[in-house]
Amino acid sequence: MAVNTAPAPPSLPQSISSELEVRIRKRFSNPEGSFHLNVHFRALAGFTILFGASGAGKTTLLDCIAGLTDPDDGRIAVGGEYLYDWEKKQNVAAWKRRIGYVHQDLALFPHMTAGENVAYGLRAFSAAERQTRSREILEVFRIGHLRDRRPAQISGGERQRVALARALVTEPRALLLDEPLAALDRPTKSSLVDDLRRWNQQHRVPILFVTHNGEEVFALGDEVIVLDAGRIVAQGRPHEVMRAPRLETVAQLSGFENIFNTTVLALHEDRGTMTCQLGDGKVELETPLVRAEVGSRLRVGVRAGDLLLATKKPQGLSARNVLPGTIQRLEQKDVIISAMVDCGGTEFEVHLTLAARDALQLGSGKSVWVVVKTHSCHLMGA
Amino acid sequence: MNWEAFWLTVRLAAIVSALLIVIGIPIAYWLTYSRWRWKFLVEAAVALPIVLPPTVLGFYVLVALGSRSPLGRWWESLTGHTLAFTFEGLVIGSLLYSLPFAVQPFAASFGAVDTSLLRASASLGHSPLQTFWRIVLPLSKAGLVTGFALSFAHTLGEFGVVLIVGGNIPGITRTISIDIYDQVQTANYSSANQTALVLLVISFVVLSIVYGLHRRAWAVGPWR
């Protein structure tokens, strides 16, 4: 009796086969001039955040991967298949790449209903199959009830869901999301992110997610790539890249309002700290210990929201740095008060609430104490 | 009122504007999306009938249709008679004469379709032609109607090309505008006035449709 001994086709984990590899160069222009996009990275299944200021080349990069613009040279592969290879003169047309792309402007087709928009990418399937699949994905994104409405008749958050559903229903080999959440309020954003996560747990494709919002980096990222003027300046897990930025561009982008030059005065290896001199002034700061020598010059970043102000010299605090200073000016930004405080020649930006300003009767010229926790000081190479 | 001339003219205008939909869409498509560096030369050639005296256009069409040209000879060997001074000859002359009035609104409306929609369509697996068919054409309905209406109205009122290419054969090539000319020549003013009025009213109605379609609220179409 014949026994079928042929092994079942090996079911490779998707995470291996769906890797996205990009190594390209491309000249691009933004309002500040002309740049060279020059990047090399791999993105595994899951979220990879592309982080950078506007004009850093993020959209140009995504357009190259989607096939909507051609790189100058290099190659792009997804799941081991080359989509673009300059050396072999290979360039798969955008519409044959099976790369999902959701742009910030969504680009829903105005003459089609939400259901028709979603079914649009299912050209290869029978009408019945198109129906079933688009119904399913509309349910996953909780917009089943909008199926017969035109894009003009639904809200911004709902349009965002339709655009995502439309891209995902085609089961793309990789997903490019160019700030798809930028226009949403926070609750809508987080529920959409949850839906997106749930979808990706089943499908496991590389998702490149563009943002210049630091919060989204932490909320979504398995991996973050920081792009500046066309180059990758940092790459790694979000907390490594964002919490202890070794690069100033990252620091500015991730919200360090205070960035100073410092000189290391003393190392306290037993306590895990060191003493640094701020700028040329007399102010000293205790910071976490990093690999440095006495006399090395470093940069230190401190978030304005991590600083405290006191009108009397505080006693019995765990914070190691209490610096005397004078308020130079106060500015109101939305519901935040930004106080500029001069401490012996170094100006700190401190963020306060409106209530704190009123309770402490703060105003320019007032003498205050700036409290800086050691671990709020983030050191980076100069 | 010469009803024979009237219906002949309407038939000519309907055939020409219908054919211009078929011919004009590919030309407008090419003009909209081509990146050929000499494209402007084609654009200028297509627009030529707008500024050219109809007699000049008519003259060259007559030469091209005559039995000395390859086209004329080919047609003669096929049908046994020349194209000049026939209804078919009128159709060909009018196609050229009204071409820009169809192609320009078509191309303008194709070009007005948001490119982000075309990019989205490509990312969703549709070839440029499929995208054209399912996104660009449906969103260009107003432009298509405009091009049809303008070429219809323009053909309705043509005179110079018709006279040169078609002559003035009742029932075959005598159109309303030539009929009006004849009546004025024979001092038959009241009949000329009647016919002229009909032409005026039709032209006004057609242009009203065109401008109505382009009201803001109807940017995509009145059915929205």
Image: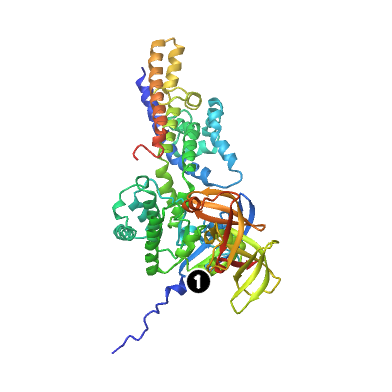
| Left or right position of B218 against A77 | left
Where is residue A31? Give x, y as percent: 61, 49
Mark 1 falls within which chain? A
Observer-nearest of B174 and A46 = A46
A209 in relation to B21, above or below: below
In the depicted structure, whether residue B128 falls above or below residue A81 = above
The residue pinned by badge 1 equals: A80
Q: Which residue is at 42% across, 44% downward?
A: B137
The one nearer the camera, A137 or B128, is A137
Looking at the picture, does residue B136 appear above or below residue B219?
A: below
* Residue at 29% across, 59% down: A128
Q: Tell me the colour scheme of the image.
A: rainbow
Q: Is residue A24 visible?
A: no
Q: Quadrant of the N terminus of chain A?
A: bottom left
User: Where is residue A328 shown, x and y percent of the image?
Assistant: 61, 51
Say what amino acid the circle numbered 1 marks: Gly
Residue at horizontal 54 percent and vertical 38 percent from the top = B70
Could you tell me which secondary element the residue under label 1 belongs to?
A: loop
